[in-house]
Image (spheres, grey):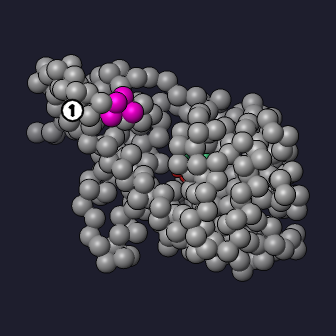
């Protein structure tokens, strides 16, 4: 059965493209934007998403999708759970689509379940602006019901029947993309300082064709998303610690991403767009003193 009415919390970069794709396939999309920033409200308007109060939203939606930042995932689940309780709505599907640890997913799942909702663990791998090529990975007892999103142009894959599987999958994947962004940023800033940027980029391309090109776009997007990506690395590190493993690279990646976020470089787009390229971004990082020793 295809979904006819879907709620998205919130209309960030990914929420914007998710909403537009659903709408193109005839799905009615709504959001609750109380307390959200001006740019998020504008994105909702630009995507043609109906803004309604939370209790009304959970009363009408067949599916509520959480696409926020990792640090807000539990809070949003708790708010939706409260609205489920207030409205008396039972059995509504809730798709947790953030890059969070399995422990955070479990905590979010418990509040949704206590309020009578049905929690599906999930994660999105792929770029928001190329959402048709992205895949939504899901797990949990009702995960298979997300396959209905295929009718709205999305790729969906069920990983298993347990909550936490889709979250663990995503944070381990995120460790690769963000780890490469952190590593290349550090190495290329060094190469730039030694006047070796072009030759080293040529050498990287010869040794690993296409790799820097793929990672370069992600580095340019750090001007906008470094803070959220640092949170993802915190979730990855916590996942390892919880399992008795001591992460080394994830905390280092988190640190460089936090340093970039602290530069406060760009304002978010009202149409979920990105700008900048790798070379310009490295220049910007260098001008703003990224990785400069203080004494
Ligand atoms: N962007 C991508 O290409 C991409 C790719 C794969 C997966 N994802 C996943 O998608 C999620 C969102 O990423 P994004 O790039 O869309 O981030 P984003 O552009 O920073 O948007 C985050 C959205 O969450 C909202 N938000 C923050 N705190 C909230 C709260 N307490 N309650 C409700 N809404 C809240 C923000 O609203 P305000 O403006 O009011 O702060 C904003 O609308 C992440 O979990 C990420 O892993 C994104």
Assign the magenta stretch its main secondary structure. Answer: helix
Using a 10 Å C-alpha cutoff, classify the residue at mark 1 as few (fewer than 14 neighbours), some (14 to 19) or many (20 or more). few
- Residue shown at 42%/52% (left/top)? 174
Q: Residue at x 74, y 63 (%)?
A: 145
Identified at 58% across, 49% down, the residue is 135
Q: In this view, does 130 lie to the left or right of 228?
A: right
Q: Quadrant of residue 17?
A: top right
Residue 36 appears in the picture as rendered:
no
User: Magenta region: which residues?
Assistant: 210-214
Query: Circle 1 sits on which residue?
Result: 207
Q: Quick one: quadrant of the N terminus? A: bottom right
Q: Position of residue 106 (x, y in %)?
A: 57, 74
Q: Is residue 140 a member of the stretch shown in magenta?
A: no
Q: Nearer the viewer, residue 251 or 265?
A: 251
Q: Residue at x 24, y 61 (%)?
A: 248
In the displayed structure image, the side of residue 183 where residue 3 appears, left or right: right
Q: In which quarter of the image is residue 81?
A: bottom right
Q: Nearer the viewer, residue 224 or 90?
A: 90
């Amino acid at each position: 059965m295809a979904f006819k009415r879907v709620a998205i919390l919130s209309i960030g970069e990914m929420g914007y493209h998710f909403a537009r794709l659903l709408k193109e396939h005839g799905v009615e999309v709504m959001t609750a934007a109380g307390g959200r920033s001006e740019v998020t409200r504008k994105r909702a308007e630009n995507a043609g998403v109906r803004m309604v109060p939370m209790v009304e939203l959970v009363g009408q939606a067949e599916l509520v999708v959480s696409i926020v930042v990792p640090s807000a995932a539990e809070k949003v689940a708790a708010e939706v759970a409260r609205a489920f309780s207030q409205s008396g709505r039972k059995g509504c599907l809730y798709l947790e689509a953030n890059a969070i640890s399995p422990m955070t997913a479990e905590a979010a799942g418990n509040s949704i379940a206590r309020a009578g909702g049905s929690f599906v663990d999930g994660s999105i791998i792929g770029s928001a602006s190329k959402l048709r090529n992205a895949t939504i990975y899901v797990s949990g007892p009702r995960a298979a019901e997300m396959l209905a999103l295929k009718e709205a142009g999305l790729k969906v894959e069920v990983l298993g029947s347990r909550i936490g599987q889709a979250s663990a999958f995503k944070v381990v994947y995120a460790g690769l993309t963000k780890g490469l962004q952190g590593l290349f940023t550090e190495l290329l800033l060094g190469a730039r300082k030694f006047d070796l940027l072009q030759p080293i980029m040529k050498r990287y391309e010869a040794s690993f064709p296409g790799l820097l090109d793929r990672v370069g776009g992600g580095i340019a997007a750090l001007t906008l998303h470094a803070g959220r990506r640092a949170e993802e690395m915190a979730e990855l590190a916590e996942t390892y610690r919880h399992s008795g493993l001591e992460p080394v690279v994830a905390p280092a990646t988190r640190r460089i991403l936090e340093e970039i976020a602290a530069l406060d470089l760009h304002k978010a787009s009202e149409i979920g767009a990105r700008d900048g390229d790798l070379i310009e971004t490295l220049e910007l990082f260098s001008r703003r003193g990224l990785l400069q020793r203080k004494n």
